Image (cartoon, rainbow, N blue to C red):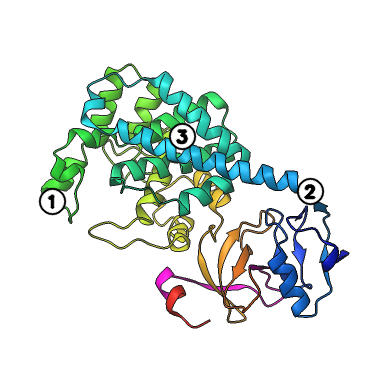
Amino acid sequence: MNSYDVVQIQEGSLFSGPLYLDEHFILATPEIPFSKELAAALLDWRFQEVYSEGTPRLEKVLISDKDKLKRALEFYEAFQKYVTTLFTPGMLKNDLSFTALAQKIQEACAIIQLDSHTFFRVSLVYKPEVDLNYQVAHAITSTILSLSIGVSLKLPNEQLEELGVAALLHEIGMTKLPSKVNLHKRELNLEDRKAIITHPILSYNLLSSLTFPPAVCNAVLQHHERENGNGYPQKLTGNQIGLYAKIIGVSCSYEAMISNRPHKKAKDMHSALLYFLKNEGKQYDDTVVRALVNVLSPYPIGLYVLLSNGQKGQVVEVNPKNFRFPIVQLTGIPRAGKVYVQTSQEQGMAIVRTMTKEEFDTAGS
């Protein structure tokens, strides 16, 4: 591992590998620039050197990273506005165009294939100026997650387009239901639930009438089917269910679990992922579940955690070599600025448990 003199490192430098304070602590991951505040804190602590297996990179890389984040944010904002128009009654009186939708999906795929982690960060922290109705928010997150799973499964571009369009419109039939059911802000009664069960058929009929590809129509019809036959509306099992529907079923269910509803509180992302890993009753396809874990990792970006040394932190980067040990940003270290640690069982820095945001905010450092 190379050593670097703190006073010689240029402000804004990015290292091609993690930058270490010692063998335990990561000061900066490759996308985090070396700041003058960090340099001042290190010198104040009397640390004259830092270590990395990588080499420092110049300002142009930092600009590239900023551009990548800006591109993801701009697309995400535009995508939200576009999806909102799809779920308005006026839009449904016009022809929904598969070609136009596929173009939007192509744009989303380009960003996901370039850097899915940046896109996930944007989707986790971006707050629109106005509240999105549940259908729009659900469609956006389900689509991003479905496409990420599709990319992980190495689906060709043509199939990613069909998958993305199906994910985007999988709940479009809900707009045909009474508004008290469609945009409910209360716990549903038995009559409401019976009405909601019809929405896959309504979605299928609408898209079929607009001559969408059969694969897209079948995916929206089947996205609530389950491997064990306990889904609806046709009680299909295993290979009777198409791959697109299996992917959307996992994405749709995961999004519903991590979102607050009138009748239930949202699960944290880790607990929701554990639900799929257990896969009790074999509801979901194992290959799709593995792809979900590959996309999110057991400790998704943004998750609050308690480490084995008693410190709190937030997951900021997935470790592709071992999903159980992500990179965590520590909190409660005075004057240290942003401090990162590569979690590791051997070094006594493993994740003990997850924390809710409320617990994270109120617990002592």
Task: Say which quadrant the N terminus sits in.
Answer: bottom right
Q: Is residue 226 left or right of residue 53?
A: left
Q: Is residue 285 left or right of residue 339?
A: left
Query: In this orientation, which residue lies closer to the viewer: 225 or 67?
Result: 67
Q: Secondary structure at mark 3?
A: helix
Judging by the rendered image, the residue that carries numbered circle 1 is 190
Is residue 348 located in the magenta-colored stretch of the structure?
Answer: yes
Q: Secondary structure at mark 1?
A: helix
**Image point (39%, 31%), residue name:** 166
Report if the CB atoms under discs 3 and 2 are less than 8 Å apart.
no
Judging by the rendered image, the residue that carries numbered circle 3 is 243
Give percent across and percent down for residue 65.
65, 46
**Image point (13%, 45%), residue name:** 180
Give percent across and percent down for residue 157.
56, 26
Near mark 2 (Cα within 10 A), the count class, few <14, some 14-19 or many ≥20, is some
Q: Which mark is residue 312?
A: none
Judged by depth in the image, the label closer to the viewer, 3 or 2, is 2
Q: Secondary structure at mark 2?
A: loop
Give percent across and percent down for residue 336.
66, 74
Judging by the rendered image, the residue that carries numbered circle 2 is 58
Mark found first going from the N terminus, 1 or 3: 1
Give percent across and percent down for residue 145.
47, 43
Q: Bounds of the magenta span?
A: 338-359
